[in-house]
Image: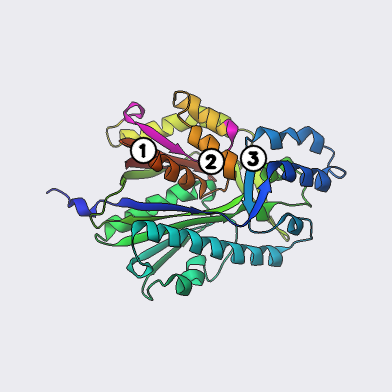
């Protein structure tokens, strides 16, 4: 029996949103020097991290001055609730408009966020303003980190496929700048301060016969004994970043075999892929991906340019890349991929 083509989930639209406050990297390093220079003896040794990120601009829900004031869980949480809700609505409205759908046409909302705690969750806070139905199904997801945007598309596609004719809105929103810690004298904190920004991305996935890139498969690969590679540590003041210097080496050694195994389940191989959309975790990670997949020069220019223009926003960043690659003509068999805490690769095979 042949499956109904209309039941195959497709991405009807992808949209992105940024908060109002600009963080030029040149000003960030000046503020960091003011904050850490006289208190953290290793700061000058770590200062080149800011220049080596390849980032020129990032964005924040709060201005520079806010980060020079003492913050605690309450103030950070309020900044998260205000900023994340506004970004959620901005990205969602753009995605709905691009899909030519009203909010009341959405059957399920998947919310991806790991940089704050919200109960009620973000889609409930945005519900009335967006005009979502009273019976909309809500799926808030926490803890996926940088892999969240790709995992969100995967989950949304599965939900759409399970209910042919339905429409699913997935929104990934992260307020990473709330992890900037003036009290934490660690290399991971300096790297987070040099790398992360705030942002949101949304996509509408449908199983109603509309055109768009088709999600043909999705999966994850979690490597054992890697819990300490990436994540949060939590204390009375808020989240603190955990990073391992081994991430680029893990990408070089383990990413391609994981992707090959994922594709093999469909009788496909890496060589069959015609395009990639990766989460650009950092310049070293992008270079490691190029080497691992033997990509030609320029293949990941959009990943590098996204990092340059907006920094690493965690979960939404891969969808920023996907949007630009689709606009640039990404076609054929393609892979959308990101790495996140676990340590996990999240993978989506598209027919774009």
User: Residue 52 at what x, y percent from top left?
Assistant: 67, 32
Q: Are marks 3 and 1 in contact (CB under 8 Å)?
A: no
Mark 2 residue element: helix
Q: Quadrant of residue 295?
A: top left
N-term mark: 3 or 1 = 3
In the image, residue 54 lies at what x, y percent?
A: 62, 35
Q: Mark 2 points at which residue?
A: 306
Residue 167 shown in magenta: no
On screen, 51 above or below 232? Answer: above
Q: Residue 329: which numbered mark, if any?
A: 1
Instruction: Report the side of 145 relative to 264 (left or right).
Output: right
- Does the CB distance between marks 1 and 2 fall below 8 Å? no
**Disc 3, disc 2: CB below 8 Å?**
no
How far is mark 3 from mark 2, CA to CA?
Answer: 10 Å
Q: Is mark 1 on a helix, strand or loop?
A: loop
Q: Mark 3 points at which residue?
A: 56
Query: Crowdedness of circle 3 by 10 Å Cα count: few (<14), some, many (20+)?
Result: some
**Residue interval drawn in magenta:** 269-284
Q: Can residue 225 be seen in this view?
A: no
């Amino acid at each position: 029996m042949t499956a109904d083509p209309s039941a195959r989930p497709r991405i009807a639209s992808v949209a992105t949103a940024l908060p109002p406050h600009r963080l030029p990297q040149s000003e960030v390093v000046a503020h960091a020097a003011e904050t850490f220079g006289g208190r953290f003896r290793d700061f000058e040794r770590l200062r080149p991290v800011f220049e080596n990120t390849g980032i020129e601009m990032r964005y924040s829900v709060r201005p520079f001055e806010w980060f020079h004031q003492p913050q605690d869980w309450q103030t950070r949480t309020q900044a998260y609730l205000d900023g994340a809700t506004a970004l959620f609505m901005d990205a969602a409205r753009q995605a709905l408009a691009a899909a030519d759908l009203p909010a009341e046409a959405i059957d399920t909302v998947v919310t991806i966020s790991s940089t704050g705690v919200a109960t009620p969750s973000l889609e409930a806070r945005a519900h009335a303003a967006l005009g979502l139905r009273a019976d909309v199904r809500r799926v808030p997801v926490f803890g996926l980190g940088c892999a969240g945007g790709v995992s969100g598309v995967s989950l949304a596609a599965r939900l759409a496929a399970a209910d042919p004719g339905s429409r699913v809105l997935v929104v990934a929103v992260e307020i990473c700048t709330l992890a900037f810690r003036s009290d934490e004298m660690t290399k991971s904190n300096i790297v987070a301060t040099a790398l992360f920004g705030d942002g949101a991305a949304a996509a509408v996935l449908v199983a109603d016969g509309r055109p768009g890139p088709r999600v043909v498969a999705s999966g994850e690969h979690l490597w054992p004994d890697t819990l300490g590679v990436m994540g949060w540590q939590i204390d009375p003041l808020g989240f603190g970043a955990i990073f391992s210097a081994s991430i680029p080496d893990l990408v070089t050694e383990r990413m391609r075999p994981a992707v090959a195994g994922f594709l093999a389940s469909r009788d496909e191989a890496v060589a069959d892929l015609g395009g990639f959309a990766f989460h650009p975790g950092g310049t070293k990670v992008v270079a490691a991906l190029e080497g691992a997949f033997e990509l030609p020069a320029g293949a990941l220019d959009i990943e590098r340019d996204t990092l340059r223009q907006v920094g690493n926003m965690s979960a939404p960043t891969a969808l920023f890349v996907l949007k630009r690659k689709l606009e640039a003509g990404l076609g054929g068999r393609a892979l959308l991929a990101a790495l996140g805490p676990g340590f996990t690769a999240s993978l989506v095979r598209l027919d774009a």
